[in-house]
Image: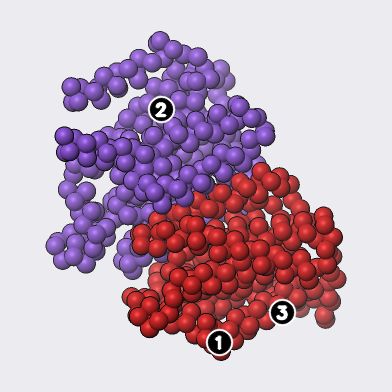
Chain colours: A red, B purple
Amino acid sequence: MSAIFDIYLLEALINGVLLGGVLALLALGLNLIFGVIDVVWICYAELIMMGMYSMYYLYSVYHLPFVVVAIISMAGVGVLGVLLHVIVIQPLLGAAPINQLLATGGVLALLQSTATITFGIDFKNLGIRLPVIEIADMFVSYTRLLAFGVALLGMVVLYLFLSRTYTGTAIRAIAQDRQIMPLMGVDTKRIYIITSAIGGVLAGLAACLLVLQYDVHPFIGLTFGPITFMICVLGGLGSMVGGFIAAFVFAEIISVGGLYLELEWGYVFAFVFFIVMMFVRPQGLMGRRS
Amino acid sequence: MSKLLPWIAGAALVALPFIYNSPYPLHIIVIILIWSFVYTSWSVMGRFGLVSLGHGGFLGVGAYVNALLWNNFGLTPWIGIPLAMLAAAGLAVLIAYPCSRFRITGHYFALVTMALSAIVLQVITATRDVTGGSLGYTPQRVPGGSSLFAFQFTDKETWYWIALAIWGGGLFVRWYVDRSMMRYALEAISEDEDAASAAGVHVTAEKLKITALSAAMTALGGALYCQYQMFISPDTVSGISASLQMVFASVVGGIYVLLGPTVGAVITIMLAEVLRIGFGTAAVGWDNFVYGILLVLFIIYLPQGIVGSLMAKLRGARVGS
């Protein structure tokens, strides 16, 4: 009896790692935006939803090849990110941080209702069924494995971009000191726009991976949104390494908690864990707070 | 004259059902009054820079605790509602105390409280054997429909007076806080916590008081909504959407003025109703679409809200003349 039990636990642990990869990717874009521009995009998960709809329509309705669809969707969400920055965030850069947060809350309502009006409230499915791999009596979904791999790849590419290119260096420099960089001849406005575009593209990438696993509907953002913010805060807002670790911790809690009880309880445990951690380490796992 | 105005307006509101008691408009007014009270409750702390996205949680606790006590133990709402308010206040203190101790403010406070409303939503959904989950929950009706003991009334007039009294009470609490020493303490805290603390303000105690007050009032609003509608679902009374809705209406009306949240409630509810009646099911989603745009525009161009900006204009005109 206990042997069977352990296999389920191991399966849950492995699925947790795979989920963690995707959650880490979700948190990455938000962390980048926060670290560099110092705003929280409450509507981040809704950008992902728009990417998922774009994937669905281009692939299932217009029958374009998957890779082309993925590239168009990523670029599309990237453009949305830039628009969000230019239209909503830029006028509010000098305002109280909480106003920026609430304004993106308005964008959340806007995107959600746009999706409701344009696409309807029914669940839409891409209709791709990838096989389930069986390893030593454990079932691991190929989709999740793929998502995990691509998420890791995306993170490596972002890391190389930030550490090896001139623009990447400028982005990291701004994240370190907002006041001094304009004096050093860095065009802050341009860097913010580039960062927003990258944040959007990362959301688009997450959309490509999530649409393989979940049906898309206008309220799907409320499923990932809270968990993404909690990962970022737990990791220390702006800290990418912290976000990465937090994503895996959260994913394991959800996956293992969901094994013993229902899936909602996995989320409840994760949220409670988050609140407890906020009191133990309010600056986040790897955070630096002024 | 301006001293008398609130009393005249109040008397006119109390007398309204004697002159005009068409059920549908009265229903809309009751709904507006209940939500006005909830939004006012949010603004009691929101106006001091304590932007909470956890009030959806308090609203849910208020609605569900009271309804569950009634259905399972037959406990009258006269006791159930105060218990629900206590539960919400306790939950608020549980969150606010460490938040204040560890200096979780601004962004962080909003995100931590957001986690709270997400937890309440998930717990209600997960305990579906008791709460009915996402299908919603109905308090048991008493035979005959109306009972003071069960706090259930069939006629709209009674509900109108109850909602009016609660709303008036909410305005009074906010007005009272406005005139108390607490206001100065909280304003000082929102400007600079260290300076306030150095000046002898007990930061944590002040924050806890206002948070517990605001949470208890919100729970009362949730319970009242449940008793009036006789149906609650986790998505309407808890979660992040409910929290954002409170913030949105308050910001549109103006969080720094007494009647701001009320005006916000009138605007948002009327907008939803007009769209619903005018366009039927084709209007699904449009009210949120308009809210979203308005929220963004208001925060960028009119952060004081409608009433706040109007009052600032009037004041400016008076000073100018």
Disc 1 or disc 3, which is closer to the eye? 1
The structure residue drawn at horizontal position 24% and vertical position 53%, both measured from the top left corner, is B186
The structure residue drawn at horizontal position 51% and vertical position 33%, both measured from the top left corner, is B271
Disc 2 or disc 3, which is closer to the eye? 3
Under circle 2, the secondary element is helix
Q: Amino acid at mark 2?
A: Ala
- Characterize the local packing of mark 3: few (<14), some (14-19) or many (20 or more) Cα atoms within 10 angstroms: some
Task: List the residue tagged with mark 3.
Answer: A149
Tell me, for residue A165, which label it has, or none: 1
Q: Position of residue A138 (x, y in %)?
A: 80, 76
- Characterize the local packing of mark 2: few (<14), some (14-19) or many (20 or more) Cα atoms within 10 angstroms: many
Q: Is B228 left or right of A133, judged from the image as shown? A: left
The structure residue drawn at horizontal position 65% and vertical position 55%, both measured from the top left corner, is A220
Marks 1/3: CA–CA distance: 24 Å
Q: Amino acid at mark 3?
A: Gly
Tell me, for residue B163, which label it has, or none: 2
The chain to which mark 1 is attached is A
Q: Position of residue B124 (x, y in %)?
A: 57, 49
Under circle 1, the secondary element is loop
Under circle 3, the secondary element is helix
The structure residue drawn at horizontal position 56% and vertical position 17%, both measured from the top left corner, is B144
Counting residues from the N terminus, which is met first, the one under dot 1 or under dot 3? 3
Residue at the extreme top: B19
Viewer-side residue, B163 vs A110: A110
The chain to which mark 2 is attached is B
Query: Are discs 1 and 3 both within one chain?
Result: yes
Q: Is B139 left or right of B213, judged from the image as shown? A: right
Circle count: 3
